[in-house]
Image (spheres, rainbow, N blue to C red):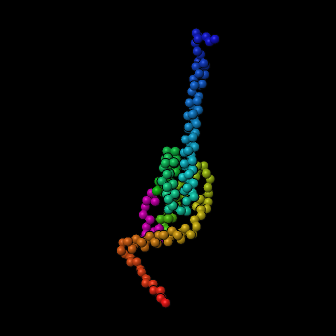
Amino acid sequence: MFDFSSPLKLADIATIAVTFLSPFFAVQASEWLRSRARDYESREQVFHTLMSTRKARMAPMHVGALNRIDLVFPAKRFPKVSDAWNFYLAHLMMDQGTTDAEIKAWLKVSDDRFFPLLRAMAAAQKVSFTDTSMQHNGYYPMGYVFSEGQQQEVRAAALEVLRGDRAIAIKAAPSPKQG
């Protein structure tokens, strides 16, 4: 039987404590690892979306990923990403201009700020990309460019009609011959 009259030794108390607390610490460690994995996956998703849409920056997925940067790359843990994002965001909020030269200049600065953001995100995720592959290895079909151009023309013409700046041209068709 047990001798309850002898005092417990420190080693005995430690053994009992470890026995009861180890499942708690195992669950906590497991939750911590799961949380870190979710955080990493969220950062990966944003980075992958920005990389896959880098040639289509007006795409809703691209804009959504940009707006998630602050959430998944917090400034305290990722200051380089945060600085690059804020620098790029400040440019995005600027007027693009109206002339072709102004728009081209704005787009050039946009590239000059966007790719350093991608580089900072790649470094934070420990992903290796060359500047050349990051900037030039994306594909955006000319059909998309053509289609988007047509959509812009149609929207612009519709707005002119709705504002009363343009009339809708109507042509009379010859009547079919009766015979």
> Is residue 116 positioned above or below 166 on the image?
above
> Is residue 148 positioned above or below 81 on the image?
below
For image coordinates 52% across by 70% down, the residue present is: 147
Q: Nearer the viewer, residue 170 or 91?
A: 170
Split into 4 quadrants, where in the image is the N terminus?
top right
Percent position of residue 98, x then y: 43, 69
Percent position of residue 3, x then y: 61, 10
Q: Nearer the viewer, residue 132 or 3?
A: 3
Q: Which residues are magenta?
A: 90-103
Question: What residue occupies the far front of the structure in this picture?
Answer: 179
Question: What residue occupies the far left of the structure in this picture?
Answer: 164
- Numbered circles on residues, count: 0
> Is residue 96 positioned above or below 88 on the image?
below
Camera sees residue 74: yes
For image coordinates 43% across by 61% down, the residue present is: 94
Camera sees residue 101: no
> Is residue 32 positioned above or below 63 on the image?
above
